[in-house]
Image (tube, grey):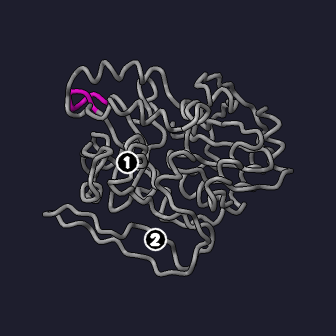
Amino acid sequence: MTGHDLLDTLGDIDARFLRNEADMQAKNDGKYMWLAVAAALLVIAGGVYVVSRFVLPGRQEAKATAAVTYTAPSETTNTVPTSSTNAPDSKEQGVFVPEIVLPESEEKGALVMMDMVGLVVYKGGIYTQAEYYGEQDLEKVSELIGERLGTAKGNLDEWSSQDEYATEFASNMAGEVYTVKGYDPDFRICVCVYENDDILRMVMFMERMNNITLATGEDIFETRLHIYGNVKSVQKQSQEDWNNGRGNRSDVSISDEVWDAFWRSTNEAPVVDTWSDVNEAEKWYREGKIVHLYLEMEDGTVNHIRLKEGGYVGYTITQDSFWVKIPLEDFNKVFEEVQ
């Protein structure tokens, strides 16, 4: 990892979380065992392509293949079958994002990187860290905590075996796992950390954006994130400020007409495969101006969106970035407003 790569990974760290981590860890409660790692988890939230090269194979055009049906793990062995949920639909064409490939034990560099990515296994799918909420932000999302699914074991590190990864609720963070109301659990669940079993201290959204086919922006921004018509407010941040963890977000005002046209185009646009070659992907990522948008939704959640000059609209979670390209006429009206 270069110096610039490291800076690129620091953008999403919340100083309040880093401050609280030491205090919470000092309680020496098992439910907080993962907090010593949590700062590192959040550190790499920005270094998307650095992580992806270790855990994701190249994408490919979706082929007409039969879907694989997930079979629930045995209650006695609690072992997840090798196939994952939601294999690509045989009727759907687009960009196929393959399932995350967990590194072999001898690939120590890859395993160290994997240890830094917050993950939990649920129904055979690997979910990785997305947005997190702590302190005053908890009030916004606490009402969205849904059905309890189980307990994240916090049993994984860079030395874990394949067998340890392949069990239900295997994770490198400990906490209670729930659905998120209003969202498909095949896409988004959450890990909640409690103090004394009843005081909510942190909610980490976990998202699965692998072993799926993405054809248009609707598959990302509408089917999964429900953005269209549900944005309450928008803030912007420059790539430089994000790279250096400066914060410096400011409010954005965009007319309803421009905003509506922008999201209609985004939902209709085809997904762009920027990951067919990792080296080219890194080069592409660094070329052209990028602006970050933080969309506060009506339900209190926040979606982090990137705009890259040339008409690109992207959604980023830890292990990957997903981009569409929309007509410049609709893109530039928003891009110019957020410079």
Label 1: element kind: helix
Q: Quarter-wise, where is residue 191 in the image?
A: top left
Would residue 293 appear left or right of 130 to someone viewing this image?
right
For this orientation, the residue located farthest to the front is 106
The picture places residue 87, in percent across and down from the top left corner, at: 46, 71
Would residue 125 appear left or right of 306 to someone viewing this image?
left
Which residue occupies the foreground of this view, 136 or 23? 23
Q: Is residue 133 above or below residue 148?
A: above
Which residue occupies the foreground of this view, 320 or 107? 107
Q: Which residue is pictured at 59% across the width and 56% down the height?
A: 220
The picture places residue 322, in percent across and down from the top left corner, at: 61, 53
Label 2: element kind: loop
Q: Which residue is pictured at 62% across the width and 74% down the height?
A: 93
Disc 2 versus disc 1: distance between alpha carbons? 29 Å
Span highlighted in magenta in the image: 194-200
Instruction: Say which mark, if any, is on residue 87.
Output: 2
The residue that mark 1 highlights is 108
Which residue occupies the foreground of this view, 233 or 124? 124
Viewer-nearest of discs 2 and 1? 1
